[in-house]
Amino acid sequence: MKTHWLKIAVLGALVPLTSWADTDPKNWDLVLEKAQGQTVYWNAWGGSPTTNAFIEWAGDRVKEEFGVTVEHVKLTDTADAVTRVLSEKEVDKDQGGAIDLIWINGANFASMKDAELLFGPWAEDLPGWRHVDVVGKSVQSDFTVPVEGFESPWAMAQVVFMYDTADIADPLPSANAILDWAKAHPGRYTYPQPPDFLGTTFLKQMLVELIDNSEELALPATDDNYDAVTAPLWDYLAELTPVLWREGRAYPPSGTRQIQLMNDGELDLAISFSPGAASTAIANYELPDTVRTFVLDKGTIGNASYVAIPYNSSAKEGAMVLANFLLSAEAQANAQDPNVLGYGTVLDVAGLPEEDKKRFDSLDLGIATLSPAELGRAQAEPHPSWMTRIADDWQKRYGVAQ
Amino acid sequence: MQTQHTFLPFLPALTLLALLGPVVGGLYGTLLPAFGHLPAAGLSGPSLDPFRGLLAWPGFLPSVRLSMVTGIGAAFLSLSVVALILAGWSGTRAFRWVERLLSPLLSVPHAAAAFGLAFLIAPSGWVVRLFSPWLTGWERPPDVLILQDPLGLSLIAGLVVKEVPFLLLMSISAMGQVGGAKQLAVAQSLGYGRVAGWLAVVFPAIYVRIRLPVLVVLAWSMSVVDVAVILGPSTPSTLSVQIVRWMSDPDLTFRLQAAAAALVQLGLVIVALLVWTAAEWSLVQLSKRYFHMGRRHARDRVLRGVGAGLAGTVSLALILGLLGLVLWSFAGFWSFPDLLPQQFTLRSWQRHSAGSFDALTETALIAGCVVTLGIVLTLGCLEAEERHNLRLTSKGMWLLYLPLLVPQTAFIPGLQTLLLNFGLETGRGAVILAHLVFVLPYLRLSLQDPWMQWDRRQAVSSAALGASPRRIFWRVRLPMLLAPILTAIAVGVAVSVGQYLPTLLIGGGRVETLTTEAVALASGGDRRAIGVFGLLQTAAALLPFAIALVVPAVIWRNRKGLRHG
């Protein structure tokens, strides 16, 4: 009994009185008013100096304009934040949680939404939502899971392959072209080790590329169809793995390390989920200026990055103000600048007011970045269950291969 | 006066609580999910499913084997290297140089040292670049598996490079108590070679004194995370790395499997400690028999040469590794096979200036609080033991070392859950208490010997002149022990600066120190950023050592005998 009272007293002292009732996002003026003075702990992957710099810039801007302080909590893995919210729910800490905003998508979003760890719906009530390109870009379903306003999009990503023109003359626009080239040049290609998201993205991309009918991938994988549908992928990997970097006995742990290996001359070809990443890396001396990008003839997978608010955030209004700022033309154009991030925009640029449109028109996308027309419309992400199963299976076949 | 007497006896009890409370509590917090009890994920135990899942993971046996082999291998190699260096060279002028070189290198953080080494030995690394293409003919780096090799050889190398300086310094301080020079002279006058004589006569006496640190090295090598991520294999990785991966899997049931694996990790460490103890015993029997045969091994130039070579290699690996980090932090474009960057730039430093300043402040604040608390507790304990005539028994020493012997992955995640269960906010305060667990043992170890060796006749003289025990403590003993106290503080700061897992998990991700920043960036693998943060980390740990050297020299400039304690 005593400890119970102590718990209430401690919790009570920690929770600002204002956050007992959640503000309705439709009442934007009230959101702005309550956001004033709040501190938003934005949990986002901290492994890339360029994204860290962008987050710092966004924080400075919302501080100036709306009086919201942003603290970037640098994660090594987004799932750490999921774990954290879960630990808090475990002990009924339903107010004043440590996390106010998470950079999230895919399996982490599905898992948090499923466990009711998210605040919402709120995303489609943001003032900035009206310029979001809901027709041309898949921003309302995240890896086939309906978003339903529980997360707000802020960047588009699409698979491209980076290749060094000093070593590879022409693009390799299909799975088989990549395989043939790898056989002729053993040890010059690899992908980050699954379950790293870029590594699993490569597996998914090859699956989508290799099978004739990708409609099955939009539905959850079943025990009945899984083996048959994924068979072409495993056949492909059986041929590819012996000619991979280090014969597939080791893999780079992340996409950034993969870029480093390309810079060191160990790799000639690498997958990326950001069309502008190669240009950004060249500008930062991280890749030789002979690197260019290509997409596959049949197209490549694309998805959106989102931000979500945990159900027990102590600064939901501030978090919404930040999410709304991320949708502004100013933030979107800045993120698309290859000298900053090189991320694709979620906005319908053609529908923007003239002065906002100019921000995008004046951008130089960079020497290695494909134009939107060259990128083409992105292929849909398979249902997350495919990725989970494939990553597990990969782990059994190649992840413990010694 | 009166208050002093009443509260001093509480200090040892308080210290013990600060030391062991978190370990015991954390293990309890690991035990529950390991047996299937995690209410938040809608799971309640007890059940053995987490262990079943763990055993069904195909990488289980390889990763257990890897942890055992790399851990025991690294500890054994480090001890052998240290013994060989000491046997061949202790007391010589060359040895002084190695000693001076290695003491600052001890504070180089693990992750920074590992990255430095990785850039040296990779197929596209500095060593290959030095000979390419003019000698090797390689215009492109060769496709050979050096880093992340399946046997964990590069991981063992990385661990040895970090452990040799630690064990060497521990042995040097033990030699101060043993006074091996005379025994060695006797052995040599009986015709023994230097190496054989030292190993037969001096080493056993030293080993008894460094045994616990050796066991700490063994436990640490088996369960280290950051170094194993950088240098170790990944198909599969060591068990500790896998535990941290499972802890962060979006599928929440993997937390149970992680907890089960954490208990297995604890069991592995216990088994390894037992194996080690058995090996010690049989080695004693074997060597007794061997030395009874009376071989003198007078000609040991080759062995001494090997010892010198190993000392040189370890120092060179650390120094060149750091130099590599320095260059990367200022590098423009830099590709294979260039030995140096094509241009130098301040961009990396400018880009990280704001973030690194915040992290530096946080790091200094935490280290300052931890060390202040720790030094008060430690000195209070020593003084209380002195006045109440208590002695730290060998069992007490084991308690002191317990937080260093229990793998961090086994109790830190559990501690986080437990803190939340009590409704306590995780954050800076909790991080300070968590750091204290790891800093206290090192403070005690650094201060124990200087405290005991202090000439008690000073106290007797002061008391005869009418000084109270309190006055003797403040006005005589503390000032005379200034140098060792400052060194202990420096050690404590270095330990606090280097903590990764406790800062990350207990801080709830909100506490950002140089180390959490560095490891977060290391997960990306950007060498320039790692260079900047690795160097700042090293500087933060080194600066207190410099102060500990300079301050006594300035204050005691006219009291030569006090300068080195």
Image: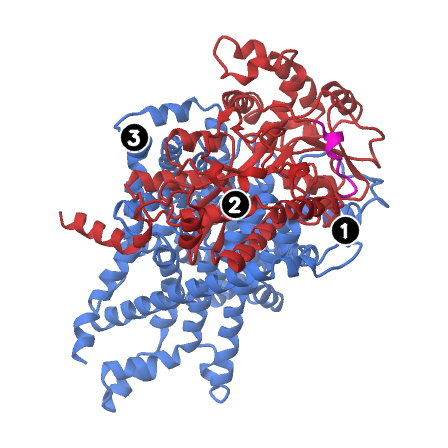
Chain colours: A red, B blue
Q: Position of residue A66 (x, y in %)?
A: 49, 56
Q: Which residue is mark 2?
A: A324
Is residue B215 visible in the rendered structure shown here?
no
Q: Which residue is mark 3?
A: B35
Is residue B515 visible in the rendered structure shown here?
yes
Q: Residue furthest front?
A: A353
Q: Position of residue A93 (x, y in %)?
A: 30, 44
Q: Are marks 1 and 2 in contact (CB under 8 Å)?
A: no
Neighbourhood count class around disc 3 (C-alpha, 10 Å): few under 14, some 14–19, many 20 upward: many
Point out the stretch of residues depicted in magenta: A366-376
Q: Residue at x 52, y 24 (%)?
A: A144
- Under tag 3, what secondary structure? loop
Instruction: Give the letter of the chain under mark 1.
Output: B
Considering only order in the chain, which callout, 1 or 3, is on the residue closer to the N terminus? 3
Q: Amino acid at mark 1?
A: Phe
- Under tag 1, what secondary structure? loop
Q: Label 3 to label 1, Cα distance in Å?
A: 52 Å
Foreground mark, 3 or 1? 1
Q: Which residue is mark 1?
A: B333
Image: A367 above or below B331:
above
Is A375 in the magenta?
Answer: yes
Q: Label 2 to label 3, Cα distance in Å?
A: 44 Å
Q: Label 1 to label 2, Cα distance in Å?
A: 37 Å
| Chief secondary structure of the magenta portion | loop
Neighbourhood count class around disc 1 (C-alpha, 10 Å): few under 14, some 14–19, many 20 upward: many
Along the line of sight, the residue nearer the viewer: B432 or B427: B427
Left or right: residue A190 compared with residue B161: right
Q: Position of residue B561 (x, y in %)?
A: 46, 83
Foreground mark, 1 or 2? 2
